[in-house]
Image (cartoon, helix red, strand yellow):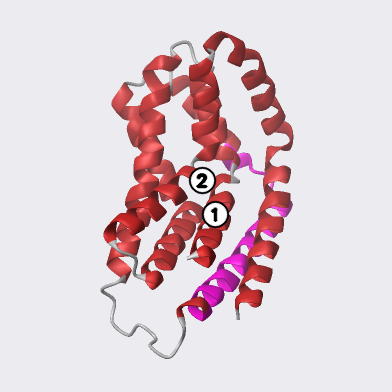
Amino acid sequence: MLSTITSLVLFGLAGAMSTVPVSVTIMILLSPDPRRGALPFLIGSLAGSIMVVGLSAVGLQFLPGRPPLLRKDELLAQIAIAIGAILIGYSVYLFVSKGQRDNAMLGKMTSRFRSARPWEFVVLGLGLNLRPKAILLAVTAGAVISVQEPPPLEGSVLVLAYAAVAQSAVVIPVGVWLHSPERAQAPLTTLYNWLQRHGRRIAAIVTLAIGLLIVGYGFLQL
């Protein structure tokens, strides 16, 4: 069980290391009417993550051909090594690309937030869980949970734990803002400007570090 939790935390941290969700969150919090969008966006983000992981965990249990000769820890190790290698490759992509598509998308969202309704923020939160990286990590987390075949309550806790870690880039800024909206404005503005300048490179470095850590952890479990 410890290996499962460790794997889920690492995958969740990898999922949180993306500039798009945290940038969108801060943009909502700095908009003229953040109360209209902050909580709906948070709800959509968490619900989307829970749905993808939960459906993956349940659905994979019904797939035929589960490898009976491999121990569960060995299978988890193989999954970790594969995902770690993909994250390393993705970090290289972040290093060499300039992220102009993300900046263009964020620019379009800024004007849209002024007239968006609460349900649209929910849909946005759900939709950000359908990015390729988010789907890959969430399905992998579901596979890790499925391999262990936990009882329903324990499996639900694992799904919620992954979602909380993976969406921490949304949960933490919203929590800070809810605690003190006025005092949060200045640090959120500073953080947003910093992310626009350095966020992609920092995400690449952290993703590379997590990928290497996951690969090393996987090899230690073999």
Q: Decide if residue 161 is on the left or right side of residue 65.
A: right
Bin the neighbour count of mark 2 within 10 Å (Cα to Cα): few under 14, some 14-19, many 20 and up. many
- The x, y position of residue 155, in whole percent, is 34, 58
Asked if residue 105 can be seen in this view, the reply is no
- The x, y position of residue 129, in whole percent, is 42, 46
- Residue at x 34% of width, y 62% of height: 56
Q: Which residue is mark 2?
A: 165
Give the quarter of the image for residue 117.
Answer: top left
Taking the magenta stretch, the answer to whether it contains residue 97 is: yes
Q: Decide if residue 190 is on the left or right side of residue 183.
A: right
- The x, y position of residue 171, in whole percent, is 49, 33
Q: Please name the predominant secondary structure of the magenta segment in the image.
A: helix
The amino acid pointed to by label 2 is Val
- Residue at x 37% of width, y 17% of height: 36
- Residue at x 43% of width, y 91% of height: 69
From this view, report whether residue 180 is shown above or below residue 26: above
Q: Check disc 2 and report its element: helix, strand or loop.
A: helix
Is the residue under label 1 in contact with that under label 2 (CB below 8 Å)?
Answer: yes
For marks 2 and 1, the one nearer the N-term is: 1
From this view, report whether residue 1 is shown above or below residue 103: below
- The x, y position of residue 131, in whole percent, is 46, 50
Asked if residue 206 can be seen in this view, the reply is yes
Q: Which mark is residue 50?
A: none
- Quarter of the image with the C terminus in it: bottom right
Taking the magenta stretch, the answer to whether it contains residue 10 is: no
Bin the neighbour count of mark 1 within 10 Å (Cα to Cα): few under 14, some 14-19, many 20 and up. many
The amino acid pointed to by label 1 is Val
Q: Which residue is mark 1?
A: 9
- Residue at x 47% of width, y 28% of height: 109
Q: Residue furthest bottom?
A: 69
Span highlighted in magenta in the image: 74-102
Front residue of 35/158: it is 158
